[in-house]
Image (cartoon, helix red, strand yellow):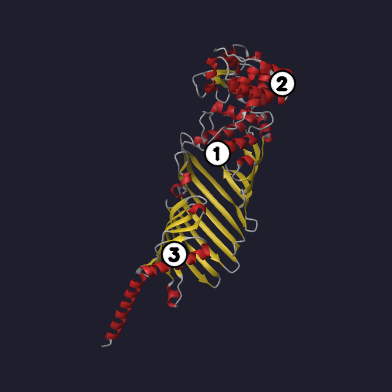
């Protein structure tokens, strides 16, 4: 008889459970539940959209898909396939409904960069010191991020620990046929503290990248790697000024070269920003020797010993590169001084050049060759035509024209593709002497390092002399001497100002422009381009008024016609 009350109680509990499950599964209850969840989320997150809330057999509430918050045009910044919330048991026994565990499945973040899908298990808690949230985020490729956040009456704190993050965990923008991270691992730590109302916050960030390989058509014919770097710094947020700033930041480049970085961006209008980059006492040998195999310099490339300094300051509207202000400098004084005390560069004397496009051909760069034309024997207007067309600041810069690079970047951004390279004569010479003509990141990195080596170990006049005697001016036409004979049937020392301007104008694409050769004279459009170059030379004092007038009036006829 004593067991009968227990059986009655158990039966009543089962009946109550069944009734509750039936009631909770009705369309009206699920609609009301969806409405309540939507209101609660909207109160904290702004505009959200949710669907299909339901309660399972363990009284866990699940709903989804979820979209929050909505951006302009109706596209969500975050989408979650399913959210499941388990009530906190102790709170439930006390008559309060509080989340004990929260599971996120199939979450995708669309802004500011696309990330996902990812899953997360979160455990919220409430104590005397404030609210606490801890958990783990599992990325699609196996990477994991542990998080712990606390919020008190006056302050909040956040700690993130990421480990084992590989290529499959990265945003889709970093995985394409033209550019992809194909191997490697990222680990990071973020420790942030701020005001409870998020009016200000500061985070210490540390990140380590190991054994990374880059591949794709923009990288080069073979993967570039392994690459490794470490970065650390402090990121601050100030809500009243809507300013995010980075300070005390250091990134380690190949060869264990430390680069310091600082800057800020304001989240208003056209996103005004400033960036300062500094690299002091960079050992050239360490930089060149620290490059991975795919970026290694050719054996014949210069390798001066010594150190140099570099700085770069950028500012302006982030989304409008054409309006950026660029202040950059490369100080090679110490590197040049050390190079002068060492053995002379092989490029200072006669050498044999094999064009990358025709490696079986041997071009003797020196007086031993009848095709060689010493710089001092060329008319000044020949030299000035080339520098005006290709590199107006050649004799003043240290290998790079940063304003021209900014302009090239702006034009490429506006057009949606690379318009022009903005390369100096020294950069072109680095490519002509040692590299292929492909437009890949690997080639540009090697070109930049070789450019520094050339500027440090070879005089400006000798660099220009080499350039003029190895540049291509038509199919198989290398050097200013053969170019003058090929196009005009004369010695380079006898070129007129207009002829020199024409030869300078075709340097960017001599094969393509060679179509004019058989025609016998330039098109009207190209002659206007040549005349424009003459005007520029006159404005720089390279031509007198009489020489300008004579050049504008002189006809151009090619030997091929």
Q: Position of residue 34 (x, y in %)?
A: 42, 66
Residue at the spot of label 3: 102
Q: Nearer the viewer, mark 2 or mark 1?
A: 2
User: Could you give the CA–CA distance between mark 2 and mark 1, rounded to whole angstroms?
Assistant: 47 Å
Furthest-bottom residue in this view: 1
Residue at the spot of label 1: 290
Q: Nearer the viewer, mark 3 or mark 2?
A: 2
Q: Position of residue 405 (x, y in %)?
A: 61, 35
Q: Nearer the viewer, residue 413 or 6?
A: 413
Q: Is residue 184 above or below residue 79?
A: above
Can residue 462 be seen here? no
Q: Nearer the viewer, residue 230 or 9?
A: 9
User: Could you give the CA–CA distance between mark 3 and mark 2, rounded to whole angstroms?
Assistant: 77 Å
Q: Earlier in the sequence, mark 2 or mark 1?
A: 1
Quarter of the picture holding the N terminus: bottom left
Q: Nearer the viewer, residue 32 or 486?
A: 32
Quarter of the picture holding the C terminus: top right
Q: Is residue 540 above or below residue 560?
A: below
Furthest-left residue in this view: 1
Q: Nearer the viewer, mark 1 or mark 3?
A: 3
Q: Position of residue 532 (x, y in %)?
A: 65, 24
**Secondary element at image label 3:** strand
- Left or right: 140 as drawn, with respect to 408: left
**Secondary element at image label 1:** loop
User: Could you give the CA–CA distance between mark 1 and mark 3, rounded to whole angstroms?
Assistant: 46 Å
Q: Earlier in the sequence, mark 3 or mark 2?
A: 3
**Secondary element at image label 2:** loop
Residue at the spot of label 2: 543
- Left or right: 509 as drawn, with respect to 275: left
């Amino acid at each position: 008889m004593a067991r009968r009350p227990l059986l009655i109680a158990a039966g009543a509990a089962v009946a109550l459970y069944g009734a509750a499950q039936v009631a909770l599964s009705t369309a009206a209850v699920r609609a009301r539940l969806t409405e309540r969840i939507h209101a609660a989320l909207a109160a904290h997150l702004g505009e959200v959209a949710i669907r299909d809330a339901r309660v399972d057999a363990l009284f866990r509430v699940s709903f989804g898909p979820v979209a929050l918050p909505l951006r302009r045009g109706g596209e969500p910044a975050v989408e979650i396939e399913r959210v499941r919330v388990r009530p906190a048991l102790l709170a439930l026994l006390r008559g309060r409904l509080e989340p004990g565990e929260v599971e996120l499945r199939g979450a995708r973040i669309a802004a500011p960069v696309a990330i996902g899908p990812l899953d997360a298990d979160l455990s919220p808690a409430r104590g005397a010191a404030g609210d606490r949230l801890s958990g783990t985020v599992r990325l699609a490729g196996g990477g994991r991020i542990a998080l712990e956040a606390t919020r008190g009456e006056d302050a909040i704190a956040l700690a993130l620990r990421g480990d084992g993050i590989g290529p499959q965990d990265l945003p889709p923008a970093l995985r394409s046929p033209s550019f992809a991270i194909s191997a490697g691992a990222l680990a990071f730590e973020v420790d942030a503290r701020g005001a409870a109302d998020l009016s200000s916050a500061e985070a210490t960030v540390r990140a380590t990248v190991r054994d990374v390989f880059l591949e794709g058509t923009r990288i080069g014919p073979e993967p570039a790697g392994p690459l490794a770097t470490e970065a650390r710094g402090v990121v601050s947020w100030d809500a009243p000024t809507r300013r995010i700033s980075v300070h005390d930041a250091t990134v380690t480049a190949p060869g264990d070269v430390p680069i310091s970085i600082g800057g800020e961006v304001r989240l208003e209008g056209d996103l005004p920003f400033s960036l300062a980059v500094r690299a002091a006492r960079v050992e050239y040998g360490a930089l060149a020797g620290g490059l991975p195999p795919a970026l290694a310099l050719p054996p014949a490339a210069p390798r001066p010993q010594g150190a140099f300094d570099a700085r770069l300051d950028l500012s302006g509207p982030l989304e409008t590169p054409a309006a950026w202000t660029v202040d950059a400098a490369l100080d090679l004084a110490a590197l040049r001084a050390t190079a002068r005390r060492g053995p002379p560069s092989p490029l200072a004397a006669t050498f044999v050049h094999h064009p990358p496009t025709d490696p079986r051909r041997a071009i003797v760069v020196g007086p031993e060759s009848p095709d060689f034309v010493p710089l001092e024997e060329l008319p000044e207007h020949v030299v000035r035509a080339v520098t005006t067309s290709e590199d107006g600041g050649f004799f003043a810069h240290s290998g790079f024209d940063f304003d021209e690079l900014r302009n090239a970047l702006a034009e490429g951004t506006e057009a949606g593709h690379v318009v022009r390279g903005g390369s100096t004569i020294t950069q072109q010479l680095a490519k002509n002497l040692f590299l292929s003509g492909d437009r890949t990141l690997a080639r540009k990195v090697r070109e930049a390092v070789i450019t520094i080596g050339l500027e440090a170990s070879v005089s400006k006049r000798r660099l220009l002399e080499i350039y003029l005697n190895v540049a291509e001016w038509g199919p198989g036409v290398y050097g200013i001497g053969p170019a003058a004979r090929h196009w005009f049937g004369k010695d380079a020392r006898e070129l007129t100002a207009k002829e020199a301007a024409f030869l300078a104008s075709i340097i960017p694409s001599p094969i393509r422009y060679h179509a004019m050769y058989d025609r016998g004279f330039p098109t009207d459009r190209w002659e206007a381009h040549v005349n424009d170059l003459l005007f520029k030379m006159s404005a720089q004092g390279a031509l007198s008024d009489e020489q300008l007038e004579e050049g504008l009036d002189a006809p151009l006829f090619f030997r091929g016609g």
